[in-house]
Amino acid sequence: MRQLKSYDGLEQKQWLQQIRFNTRTRSLVLTIVLCLMVLAAYGAGILIPQEAAAADFLHAKQPPSWQHLFGTDNLGRDILMRTLKGMSVSVTVGIVASCISAVVGILIGIAAAAGSRFWDGVISWVIDLMMGIPHTVLIILISFAMGRGLRGLLAGIAATHWTSLARLIRGEVLQLRSRHYIAVSRRMGKSDCWILIHHLLPHLVPQFLAGLILMFPHAILHEASVSFLGYGLPPEQPAVGIILAESMTYLSSGMWWMAFFPGLLLVLTVWLIDRLGENLRRVIDPYSAQK
Amino acid sequence: MNKTANRIVIIFLKNCIRMLSLLFAVSIISFALVSASPIDPVQQYIMGIGPVSEEQRAGIEAYWGVDKPPTVRYFSWLCALLHGDFGTSLLYRRPVIEIIAERFQNSFAMMLCAWIFSGIIGFSLGCVMGMNRDKWQDNVIRKLCCLLSSVPTFWLGLVLLLIFAVKLGWFPVGFSTPIGMRNNEVSIWQRLHHLALPALTLSLMSFSNIALHTRQKMIDVMNSSYILFARARGEDRWTLFARHGLRNTILPALTLQFASFAELFGGSVLAENVFSYPGLGSAVSAAGLNSDVPLLLGITLFSTLFVCVGNMIANLLYGIIDPKIREVGQ
């Protein structure tokens, strides 16, 4: 009888252990939840009709209330709606720019490590060059060269963010190249291209994805800063940086909500994406995420 | 001693050559970018001075040399640069070199304050985190650092401006000197008063990097075998920190701080725009918006020089002060 009881307890314990998630499952669940939150914010921005952020002079300059959670601006536009719409623009720009940047990064990184010493030197000199000009100044220059606007903004952000990923990939390829199985594969007469696809790329994909994900928040922040300075998107487009730049005029008249809430939403979004990236990295690349 | 001096000279010369090659490349790239721009500087210039006739326009174009090919223009610009002539700013109607010199003083004062402040705060927080690994202090500060890295500089500046300048009125809303005062009448306290908020914004943005780096270094130090031995001898935590932790982490932190001049300058562009502080950062964005090409090029080159000098100091520090590397070199 007594023995049976203890057996019961053991079974219960096992059942409990099944309920308790391990780290991997927990990160997976967290990733999905965060992903849904970001998607919801993004979808809200796209789905909100233009009329929701239309000018309404009767309700201009109102502080936050239940009707207008974030208040209204000098033209009576609802700031919450405008910010949500702007956020989806910023997130799109950030994602596109970091995708371009990550692809450039991985190609240049592989080229640096797999090519000759000479090209390695040239590429590391170019990386130094890119890091030598402050990013904001370089984005201003590129945006100026492309005649301002969305294209210039994308090119500027893409051109400034690939350097760290390229360095990372270069180091990884250099390390992999000296492995035995690569040497064996080469001796067996496999071509460089075959080795690249079958032996190198599988190792590089997690690095690439992790680098890409870590790039998102930076790219979004840069997008917001550059639009704040007045480059990039045209002023009628409701990007977060532009809303904040507009609010500068009204700061001293005490309209604090115009600057505070849009920025807060931006911080929240970037932070969510940052967390999402961290969790996703743990799922994709458990080894390096343990550090 | 002689060998060390030789090595200093060699490292210095190598860095100088690299810096010159980078500056040369930056001059080519920035010139190419500016010439590729669809924004017509002549049109912008004319818009600034009012309506002009066709002949006058042609005169301006000939005077500026717009009709010549880009390579010819580049070499004449480069020759002028080497003679110390950066051209005349279209926006301020003064020589670019004068504007850079004047504005850099303002920017430099602000960046220096922010640099020192963020260094001290970041380093001490990093030490606290590293010494209390995985305790609540570590967790709280680390979360704070992660959160701060997703805050945009200019928004933080706006919030500080709202709280301290608009609401409380402790600090002025903008500029580097009180309005209506002459430059030479302004006291040093008034200047400091004006640069406090932008400098604070800038330092709040940059300390998390150095804090996290110092934390990692401190953890590495604390896991080493010499710390184990020191513990076994009975040293308490403070002695451990003062004798081993501090000495082994301060040099990497200082190097990192010197290597972060690029982010410092990039951040100052935003901070200066929020506080309308008349430094290089606000000048570069104004130059870009108003198509002031000579000023834009001048500041790009100058900021590259600034960043390169920071990197050079970091390299020199690494190679010369660090006793481990110094002895290997000998």
Image (cartoon, coloured by chain):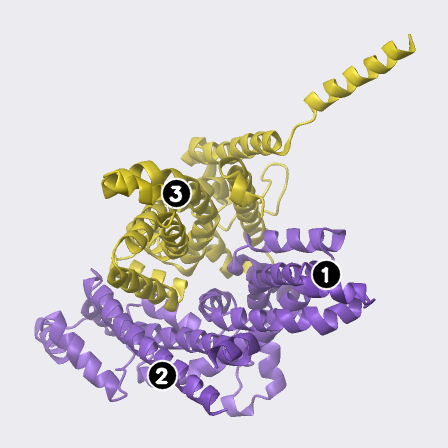
Instruction: Look at label 2 and name its amino acid.
Output: Leu
Residue A148: mark in rendering: none
Front residue of B32/B277: it is B32
Whether A265 is drawn above or below B138: the answer is above
Front residue of A205/A142: it is A205
Q: Residue at x 41, y 36 (%)?
A: A50
Q: Which chain is yellow?
A: A
Q: Residues within 10 Å of mark 1 (few under 14, many from 20)?
A: many
Instruction: Look at label 1 and name its amino acid.
Output: Met
Q: Is residue A72 visible?
A: no
Q: Residue at x 47, y 83 (%)?
A: B105
Badge 2: chain ID: B
Q: Residue at x 48, y 48 (%)?
A: A217
Front residue of A187/B88: it is A187
Q: Is residue A41 visible?
A: yes
**Residue at image mark 3:** A204
Q: Residue at x 52, y 79 (%)?
A: B327
Instruction: Look at label 3 and name its amino acid.
Output: Leu
Whether A255 is drawn above or below B47: the answer is above
Q: Is residue B12 left or right of residue B131?
A: left
Badge 3: chain ID: A
| Element marked by disc 2 | helix
Direction right: furthest residue: A2
How far apart are the two marked residues, 1 and 2, measured between alpha carbons? 39 Å
Residue B13: mark in rendering: 2
- Where in the figure is residue B250, as x and y percent of width and height? 62, 72
How far apart are the two marked residues, 3 and 1, measured between alpha carbons? 35 Å
Q: Quadrant of residue B249?
A: bottom right
Q: Quadrant of residue A10?
A: top right
Badge 1: chain ID: B
